[in-house]
Image (cartoon, rainbow, N blue to C red):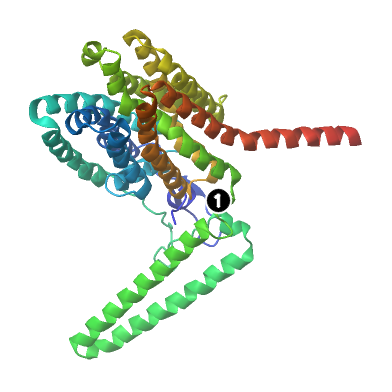
Amino acid sequence: MYASHEDIGYDLEDDPKAKKMLKPHPDIDGGWAWMMILSSFFVHILIMGSQMALGVLNVEWLEEFHQSRGLTAWVSSLSMGITLIVGLGSGMAYLPAVVMVGRYFQKRRALAQGLSTTGTGFGTFLMTVLLKYLCAEYGWRNAMFIQGAVSLNLCVCGALMRPLSPGKVENCPRGEEPSAVPAYSAESVKSGPLGVTEEQDRQPENEENVCDLQAQECQGQTRPRKNVCAFRVLKTVSQLTVRVQKGFGDWYSGYFGTASLFTNRMFVAFVFWALFAYSSFVIPFIHLPEIVSLYNLSEQNDVFPLTSIIAIVHIFGKVILGAVADLPCISVWNVFLIANFTLVFSIFLLPLMHTYASLAVICALIGFSSGYFSLMPVVMEDLVGTEHLANVYGIIICANGISALLGPPFAGWIFDITQKYDFSFYICGLLYMVGILFLLIQPCVQMIEQSRRKYTDGAHV
């Protein structure tokens, strides 16, 4: 399992037998943390920017293959959906880029996430222009080859990411080497002494096995070299087996044990929200280029594409919403909800606009309100804590992937039936509202319980 900020973000001081004073890690909120923002920024450019620019290729595929909108949209949705659901390919770089920024920042976490995720807006703008040029010059097939070559820079971004160094014990008595302090999750502490006892019983057993192998290795120094190598292999296999068993046990207890994430009702509500919400953000990027051609606005859109307007305003939306959410008098949850309602309102208004200027205004509103994506890691961290952030955010991204996988083909299928995109946006907006209602269920229940308690206390008085 992942260690929390408290486990990896601080060095230990004073007598190891006494309670230790905590000293902040030098890389938290400074130092290499800024390199993490830079790395995550370019990851968002190369991954999410490329995904959001697929609408350019969608038009090329419609013209070449002459298939229905619903069937053609499956190509774009599979690219985004499989990446987010399975986590293969670019998905293996996207999740660490989001989680690592949260581990390196504590004071201005929302702003840091906002700065790093602005790469989505920059990438959408740059990749849209790049793909249009490459498709015009070399065709869409060669354009995809060049885009893949550019994406190899993800290796450089991955090289910049490094975990925080573990805490070290200073002033160890009698020349003893510093040992790692075992980290326990909040759930394991809550579960009582039983979980801790099992963990303590498991550690001596593992240490005895390793010590036996080391003793055998020392005795084998007088034996032939083959025996020494065999003992080393056995020791390595034993250590690896212990680590795999412990990792699997932590993973199982985290997802399916008593400390399961799915026992948290707010987290389950977020999963349902993610299933309905993300498609409403993805659909405009996939189908707007086709909508522009249907409205005979291609000339104006070629000068400044509507998807680029969403991308540019999306940048400012993430930074501004992140800065506002970090204010001490502002609730991150309230900012998150207001942005969601604004995005739903924009989705409902989009089919009513038929001029370039009106579409540009709505696209700007969509771009700004969708900046709440930078707040998702912060909201998740406040909900379940830092230790489970990677697991929780991975599940939310998986739900987003399902939404991105089914949303665009569903919108295209409705167009094939009605010959209009209006109903596509109306239905997606309604589904988005259902997702927001899931988020509001638990707070409403808490408000009702609090009002009942106040009424009961007043009646007793």
Residue, disc 1: 262
Rendered image quadrant of residue 130? top left
Q: Nearer the viewer, residue 248 or 10?
A: 248
Left or right: 266 in relation to 52: right
Q: Which one is nearer the viewer's eye here, 336 or 70?
A: 70
Q: Judge whether residue 41 can be spotted in this image.
A: no
Give the image quarter of residue 287.
Answer: top left
Q: Where the C terminus falls, by quadrant?
A: top right
Q: Position of residue 92 (x, y in %)?
A: 31, 48
Residue placed at 83% from the left, 32% from the top?
A: 455
Quadrant (top left, top right, bottom left, bottom right) of the N terminus: bottom left
166 with respect to 140 (left or right)? right
Number of numbered discs: 1
Query: Residue drawn at (23%, 27%), measured in percent from left and top?
Result: 59
Left or right: residue 87 compared with residue 260: left
What residue occupies the far left of the structure in this picture? 138
Residue type for callout 1: Phe
**Quarter holding residue 73:** top left
Which residue lies at the image location 45% right of the left edge and 19% below the top edge?
Answer: 346
Q: Return the x and y of residue 165 as percentages of the image width and height.
A: 36, 52
Left or right: where does residue 406 sit relative to residue 379?
A: left
**Looking at this rendering, what residue extends furthest in the front direction?**
417
Q: Position of residue 197 (x, y in %)?
A: 58, 69
Q: Position of residue 343 (x, y in %)?
A: 46, 23
Q: Nearer the viewer, residue 254 or 172?
A: 254
Q: Secondary structure at mark 1?
A: helix
Dot 1 crowding, Cα within 10 Å, few <14, some 14–19, many 20+: some
Q: Residue at x 41, y 17 (%)?
A: 351
Q: Is residue 147 visible?
A: yes
- Closer to the camera in the image, 61 or 180: 61
